[in-house]
Amino acid sequence: MAETTTGKGQKAASSGSRAPLYMAIAIGVIIIAAIVYYSSSLHSQATVPFSEFKQNLNNAARISIAVTYYNEGQFVNESPCYSSILQVISHSRAPSTIDFFIINQTSCTYSKTGLGGSVSPTTANASYCTGKAANETGVYLNFSQANYTLVQPHHLYIYGNSGYMRTCPIAVDFA
């Protein structure tokens, strides 16, 4: 680095010594951008009261109910819960506005016309159905050893064991 002297014999900083300052500013900008991005992604992942989700569900033009399972036993165990939820929801909206997805590890079954009229089951790959369900306000039923529910503004994730799925206490909250 070249140094220059001022008229009074003092050394003046060359433009090369500003590099640490520019580096600090760049790091600060990156940190601020990361914080803004992280906060906005947390907002989209934030939990909300069930009433907010239910209002979004009631106001949606189309909704989805997605049942995920990894083996036949899990599917059988989930059956009472998704049946109860579908029954309650179909009392307050047209069944043709309900997309119902049964998703296993590789494929899924659904009806292109929703649950109204003549239901014609179609098979697609699992990623197609999860993508389609993700674009609608909906309920995801997942077999799990632990019982818990994650409520987001447009998605409700229900995790439950066989006892929970058999009684499905959350179904009454859809009424």
Image (tube, helix red, strand yellow):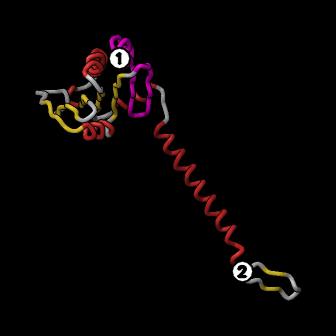
Cα distance between the residues tagged 1 and 2: 73 Å
Q: Secondary structure at mark 2?
A: loop
151 within the magenta span: yes
Residue nearest the viewer, comparing 153 with 41: 41
The answer to the question of whether label 1 and label 2 lie on touching residues, with beta carbons closer than 8 A, is: no
Residue 110 seen in render: yes
Residue nearest the viewer, comparing 115 with 165? 165
Q: Where does the N terminus fall, quadrant-wise? A: bottom right
Task: State which tag comes first along the sequence, 1 or 2.
Answer: 2
**Number of residue marks:** 2
Q: Using residue 132 as the reference point, say whether residue 40 is left or right of it.
A: right
From which residue to which does the magenta span run?
145-171
Residue 92: image x %, image y %? 28, 22
- The residue lying furthest to the bottom in this view is 7
Which percent across, then down, holds residue 50? 44, 25
Q: Amino acid at mark 1?
A: Ala
Task: Say left or right for 171 vs 13.
Answer: left
The amino acid type, in three-letter code, at marker 2 is Met
Q: Position of residue 153 (x, y in %)?
A: 43, 33
* Res. 26 image quadrant: bottom right
For the point 44% across and 27% down, which residue is it? 150
Q: Residue at x 51, y 40 (%)?
A: 42
Mark 1 Cα shell of 10 Å, populated few (<14), some (14-19), many (≥20): some
- Residue pointed to by mark 1: 171
In this orientation, does residue 86 appear? no
Q: Residue 77's image quarter?
A: top left
How packed mark 2 is, by other alpha carbons closer than 10 Å (few <14, some 14-19, many 20 or more), is: few
Q: Residue at x 39, y 28 (%)?
A: 156
Circle number at residue 1: 2
| Residue 133: mark | none
Where is the C terminus found, in terms of image quarters?
top left
